[in-house]
Image (tube, helix red, strand yellow):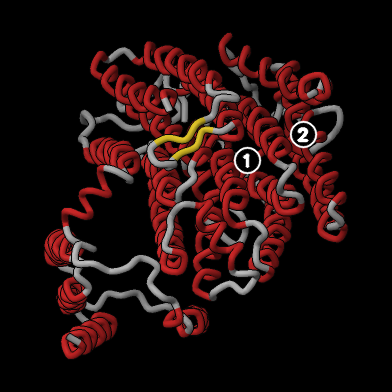
Amino acid sequence: MSALIITVVLGIVVLYLGFLNKKAILSPVAVAGLLVVLWFTSGEWNSGAAYFHDMVVFDNFSVAFNISMIILTILIFLFGMDYYRTMEFHVSEHYALMIFALTGAFLMTSFSNFIMLFLGIEILSIPLYILAGGKKYSYRSNEASFKYFMLGSFATTIFLFGIALIYGTTASFYLPEIEQYVAGCNGELHPMLMIGLLFVLIGVAFKIAAAPFHFWSPDVYEGAPTLVTVFMSTVAKTAGIAAFYRLLGMGLLPLPVPLERALWVMTGLTLLVGNMGALRQTSFKRLLAYSSIAHSGFIMLAMLSQHDNSASTLLYYTFVYSLAVIPVFIIFILVKRASNGLEQLSAFNGLFREKPWIAAAFVILMASLAGIPPTSGFLAKFQVFVLSIGQGYLFISLFAIVMAIVGVYYYFMVIREAYTESEFAKPIVLNQLNAALILICTLGVLILGIFYRAIII
Amino acid sequence: MSFLFYFLSAIMIISGLLLVFSKSPINSVIALIVCFIAMGGQYILLNAQFLAVVHIIVYTGAIMVLFLFVIMLLNLNKTTIPQKTSLTRVSAVIAGGLFFLVMIAASRQALEITPRYPFDGHTGLVSAIGKSLFHEFLLPFEISSVLFISAMIGAVMFGKKDPPGYSDPVYRNNNTGTA
């Protein structure tokens, strides 16, 4: 709880630091504050408690996810040092909004009441709607912000309607009470409750960009400023997945058969749309958007097939995925600057000639996203398949494996571009902080993959 | 009591239809305002005074009047609604119809639900809402301030005028651009 309060205060402090007109201190202050938050959050491990009439419960699950999200935010803020260097106005607002969004993410991992889940989703979303339009004078950014806002509000209304319907039948917002009510029904659920549950799941599925609620994601990822795209595809995604898992685990399991069937169809569709959509992309950010949809599919597979044991797999998967995505976007920004703002895949041309070790790191990171051993991306996917095959969901697991193999194609398409000669000279400017970030993340991806047993057990 | 309910419902349905079918946006907005006021009446019938007042102040008073202003200021009173292709229309009708069907099927059995909380005269009064807001729902009440401050930051960020000549740090040819 203290971590939550400190995060809010930190956001306000960073906001007011904007008056000093010193951009350079914003990121260090934010990172220092987040380190304090990290300290307080890790203090709650194994001493979880419920606060304010069980509105939020900080158990080990939420603490673990919160820690992972704080680390990711710190990495993103360190990247922000360089990213926001040429931006003259509203930099402190950007940092503050990201910190507020992190507050919402905390609520999404620790709710035990529908009201808190709703507020968490909104507190995460509204800063993201604003941040997506961070480049005020770019039409793409405006479009991204507007589209995200419209579709997001629509998803929110559906979600809220679902909560209302659930409240109408069960007379409670509190998830354990709803679970009790559902258990008392003996499988004969009221249709109104069923539709309510479906609507609530739709609202959360929108957040993790699961098909068929993924339409916003490529446009928004492409139009938003790259740093915001990173934030959306890492922190927001982790929060959405944690919320989805918690929602299922705290009140909705075992799901009624029609709903479960709907979720399985959603999983298959997400895998298909994500991987097939990525094949035809020429813009790098769109490609990563589709890749992010595909990863949601794998995560849903783990979540649905064996819910009780999949928490650690989900944490590992999301963390490792995010750890690979952050440096990939840093490298993308570097090559984009070197090639006159080009966002196509060909922006990567000549990377190996200019900075061979960055190209090597890029290969490792892409291999991790594709799921090639010995990177941690492979282990994450491997664990998902172990869970789902162990439960006997053979058909969808095979489908997911085929989709993972399809995925290898488009990730290596990007690697091929990085190892193609460029037509013109590309002086890639790399400062030490970015170099360190790329190095740390790449090593993290490798170490988490190779020494997996040593870390977990 | 039941006469009032049917009366207000009839007003709501008629004004709702007017909202959809009227050609002029101003008539639509006024029909929506009538619909909202009738809905406020329904809330009072349910003893939810606070909700009724908030509904009329916020929706009819603020949001709808804002709509009206925007429509008047931008002079949108002509029928400039872009025509959709017939495929979009047909698919929208089918999707909406299916959704309507599902909702009807679900709410058909809603009558079987018995109220879980016994009704007393205090339900829906301002004092009852205030008590639960500052007791049971204190955390949501407080934490929503984060939501509002983010929204305000957004309004300032988008609304503030930047110095003339300033634009986003797009790429400049000296390798220092971001974005």
Q: In the picture shown, does residue B59 fall above or below A78?
A: below
- The amino acid type of the residue labelled 2 equals Gly
Task: Answer few, some or many: residues within 10 Å of disc 1's Cα (few below 14, many 20 plus, some between 14 and 19).
Answer: many
Contact between labelled residues 1 and 2, with CB atoms less than 8 Å apart: no
The residue located at (34%, 43%) in the rendering is: B140
Q: Identify residue for label 1.
A: A284
Lower position in the chain sequence, tag 2 or tag 1: 1
Residue B102, position as x, y percentages in the image: 52, 80
Q: Is label 2 or label 1 in front?
A: 2
Q: Is residue B141 left or right of residue A427?
A: left
Q: In the picture shown, does residue A169 fall above or below A322?
A: below
Q: Is residue B13 left or right of residue A414?
A: left
In space, the residues marked 2 and 1 are separated at their CA atoms by 20 Å
Residue A411, position as x, y percentages in the image: 75, 40
The residue located at (38%, 22%) in the rendering is: A6
Taking the image as drawn, is residue B74 in sight?
A: no
Task: Answer few, some or many: residues within 10 Å of disc 2's Cα (few below 14, many 20 plus, some between 14 and 19).
Answer: many
- Look at the numbered disc 1 and give the secondary structure of its residue: helix
Q: Quadrant of residue A27?
A: top left
Residue A264, position as x, y percentages in the image: 71, 62
Marks 2 and 1 share the same chain:
yes
Residue A423, position as x, y percentages in the image: 69, 30
Q: Which mark is residue A377?
A: 2
- Look at the numbered disc 2 and give the secondary structure of its residue: helix
The residue located at (25%, 41%) in the rendering is: B155
